Amino acid sequence: MGGKILLANIDVPGIRGYDVYRSNGGYTSVEKALREMTQAQVTAEVNKSGLRGRGGAGFPTGLKWSFLDRKSDKPRYLVCNADESEPGTFKDRYLMHHLPHRLIEGLIISSFALGVKTCYIYIRGEFKYLVGILEKAIKEAHLHGFLGERILGTDFSLNIYVHPGAGAYICGEETALLESLEGKRGNPRIKPPFPAFKGLYGCPTVVNNVETLAAVGPIISMGGEAYAMIGKGKSTGTKLISACGNIKNPGVYEIEMGLPVEDFIYSPEYCGGIANDKYLKAVIPGGSSVPILPADLILSTAKGEKRLMTYESLADGDFESGTMLGSGGFIVYDEDACIVRNTWNLTRFYRHESCGQCSPCREGTGWMEKVLYRIEHRQGKMSDIDLLVRVAKNIEGNTICPLGDAAAWPVASAIRHFRVEFEEHVLHPAAMLEKERHLKLKY
Ligand SMILES: Cc1cc2nc3c(=O)[nH]c(=O)nc-3n(C[C@H](O)[C@H](O)[C@H](O)COP(=O)(O)O)c2cc1C
Ligand code: SF4
């Protein structure tokens, strides 16, 4: 279904370097944008394309750009969010590793459209190996006149800097990221003001995800309308999906939006089916923060329609029977996966990564972790299950940033769809332990 756009030419030997990238059509979209288009025309093409932010929320990119305070006499910044720390999500690092120039190209065009002269790539601290790759690509772009002063002889000048974080998940939240970039502790800011008005160093700033910005070059090359023809409805274009868990072919795939979830899981072109030919039990389709769905609901909606890989179809049924496309971290569980253990594991992550500013998140994540530990380790009570639901409800919507919701949803959805499994852990702890021991011996 559809050809590659973001990952086009990924298999060409040497495509990571400037020469091969350029001889395969690289940087022609920069030439087109800077020589033939105005800033407003570039933004108009991005608007027409229907591109939505690939960092998780799916916010329309052109609309976000239109919020940027252009009346301010302060400098404007573009910040590329390369923090990618969401469990199950590993698509941005794949893109930066193999096609660093595709990102640089997108950053140049986006900075031109936004009137930005300084752009930062804020990259996850653990991605040390990517810093060198990106800096080499930036150096090559400078050498060939695509960065620096008066790019391609125009009035437009741009510098890009790579800034590694220190390995905190919360620094992927855009305002925590800006704090960290300013050299402070990565605590999310209270909004408003939004970064479009008061972002980096108090100046108007746009923060976009790696994949979002990498899509801008192809959009300019093919035109916004042509890009919008790909995909389905308001989920236009292609999306990178990082697939992992109990599948035959884990990896990063570029799919056309609208692909049926069932095809993505079972087609040999993508996940190739469930490992060891077992049954599918559940999927978390958008990174660990989005609700888990059991097999029947991930394959078709509660209305009986085929579930598609789009923002709308995955969300169909809201939180009762739906989930989210999120960042595209597709985690698959087979019939033997223990939902309780998995939920406890995720909660440990969120408890560890909570910045601690808000009581519901700081205390709630710790509380959920303790209660889940009890249930998983044969010390749970039946009342613990409803206690977890109450704690999750009290976190949701009551925090400064969405990490609180991200911690609450996995717990609430796991209990909503797999309550029986939690009850079994409480009622038959010895049997559950024996089952896990047996599986460990087997694999
Ligand atoms: C806890 C938390 C972690 C996040 N991590 C990332 C991340 O690693 N990468 C990312 O692009 N967006 C992340 N986001 C979303 C960003 O705040 C922001 O919405 C995004 O970078 C905007 O880019 P987009 O409009 O291109 O999607 C995170 C949000 C939260 C609440
Ligand atoms: S929700 Fe959690 S991570 Fe976000 S600001 Fe509050 S305490 Fe920090």
Image (spheres, rainbow, N blue to C red):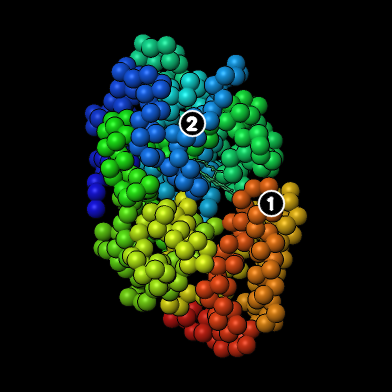
Q: Does residue 15 show up?
A: no
Which residue is pictured at 46% across the width and 58% down the height? 315
Give the image quarter of residue 278.
bottom left
Whole-number angstrom distance, CA of label 1 to CA of label 2? 26 Å
Q: Secondary structure at mark 1?
A: loop
Which residue is pictured at 31% across the width and 27% down the height? 29
Q: Is residue 436 above or below residue 394?
A: below
**Neighbour class for label 1 at 10 Å: few (<14), some, many (≥20)?**
some
Q: Which of the numbered marks, if any, corresponds to residue 100?
A: none
Left or right placement of residue 222 versus residue 103 in this view? left
Q: Is the residue marked 1 within 8 Å of ligand 2, measured from its CB?
A: yes
Residue type of the residue flagged with mark 2: Trp
**Neighbour class for label 2 at 10 Å: few (<14), some, many (≥20)?**
many
Which residue is pictured at 53% across the width and 43% down the height? 83
Q: Position of residue 62 (x, y in %)?
A: 44, 34
Q: Secondary structure at mark 2?
A: helix
Name the residue carrying label 2.
65
Q: Is the residue marked 2 within 8 Å of ligand 1, measured from its CB?
A: no
Which residue is pictured at 74% across the width and 60% down the height? 363
Residue type of the residue flagged with mark 1: Thr
Left or right placement of residue 191 versus residue 247 in this view? right
Q: Is residue 62 above or below residue 395?
A: above
Give the image quarter of residue 163.
top right
